Image (spheres, rainbow, N blue to C red):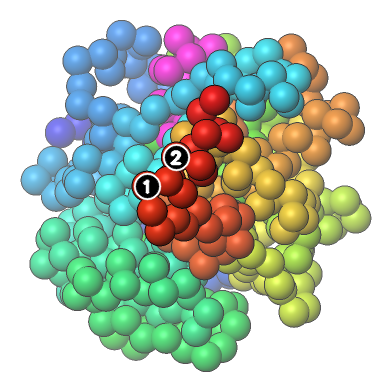
Amino acid sequence: MVNYVLGMSCVSCGEERSVDDMFFRCKKCNEPLEVNYDLSKLGLLLDNDSFQKRTWDVWRYSELLPVHNKLNMISLMEGGTPLIKSTTTLAKDLGIRELYLKDETRNPTWSYKDRGTAVGVSKAIEVNAEAVAAASTGNMGSSISAYSAKTGIKCVILITATTPIEKVVQILIHGANTIAVDQPYPELYRMIFEISEKYRVYLVHSDSPMRVEGQKTAAFEVCEQLDWIAPDKVIIPTSSGGNISAYWKGFKEFNTIKLIDSIPNMVCIQAAGCAPIVKAFKEGRENPELWPSPETVAHSISNPNPALASGRRCLNLLRESNGIAEDVSDDEILRAQKLLATTEGIFAEPAAAASIAGLKKLINNGYVGKNERVVCVITGAGLKDVKNALKNCGNPSKVMTKDELWSTLSGYLQ
């Protein structure tokens, strides 16, 4: 397999590192590293027909991924998720002409995390790591545990004590060494770095370069699914900033090698109960500050300290793309969750529905035009957090006899 990878470099100071390095943050300024490719050569190699006969998984774009040996490429058939055009009351109610939903709930463990995990675990195998690890609020742990089970590599997951039981079960059933730590997520983030350095464990973490590389394939798919015309705006629920960074990197790479002619405005949506990136963006700061006492039903995006991860990178890309950051309340999120389910048949967890809540707010304030082409990313499935869904869906009707059944149905069906 021809290798087009040039190496990794710090997103802030440019310090260069090997793509096979076990660690993924700059030792000078503690900012994330990014994988670089020879895009000039790839621009000569790839065109809009290059991918047509390939399988719809992340390895469809192997030239733009950092795993050298095909034998190390692990897949559970992640990626290839549908881009659904809303033709129902959802788009009509919002008053937008072209609304698309990138439904990442269709991935093997029901969230977008599988894209980054596939590449991260594959790279761990390639560098002969004995174990992989991550600190997680649930989705990432579920994903890494599944892929580790597939490959037989050891797996350590630190989760917060408030992780929904549905996600805990999904991690445990795959056999990962799972440790619930009664500390805020930023403390788990620091702990997992110490574990990595002490035991030479490969981190497949929220903003690790390999995770970003896998997750950028969703942006590649959006371009293909829209017949090589980039959307005007892409709206993404955001926690640490790693996933929105991945989409932005994907769009930029496809634009550089001239597979698309334009790049979208990126939109970061956070829950009002934990919105450090939104606050920093609106205040014109370079880095988000610690958010005190986060409280939201959108558990998956409640990282109070994204400055430890991709917070600065996220703020930079929002400004570079002429994008925006906005927060939405828990009530807005839960209404969007119900609206998405009843109009499009997509059961999203609260964090995933935040993109729909954000779109509604941005249409109302005029940032999103009604004739624009908009993609909302639905990041994870509702079955990952049943407790909050139960607040939003009511209870089944109860009857004791057939007569009561006919009486109950008569008002509904006649």
x, y percentage for residue 117? 32, 55
The region drawn magenta spans: 218-229
Residue visible at 47% across and 88% down?
181
Q: Which residue lies furthest to the bottom in this view?
A: 182
Cα distance, mark 2 to mark 1? 6 Å
Q: Who's the residue at 20% across and 31% down the image?
A: 2
Q: Is residue 201 visible?
A: no
Q: In this view, does 5 lie to the left or right of 333?
A: left
Is 347 in the magenta? no
Q: Main secondary structure of the magenta part?
A: helix
Q: In which quarter of the image is residue 394?
A: bottom right
Task: Give the vertical position of 141 relative to 271 (above or below).
Answer: below
| Contact, mark 2 vs mark 1 (Cβ under 8 Å) | yes
Q: Position of residue 216 (x, y in %)?
A: 45, 39
Write the residue at 42% across / 46% down.
Answer: 403
Q: Is residue 224 above or below residue 309?
A: above
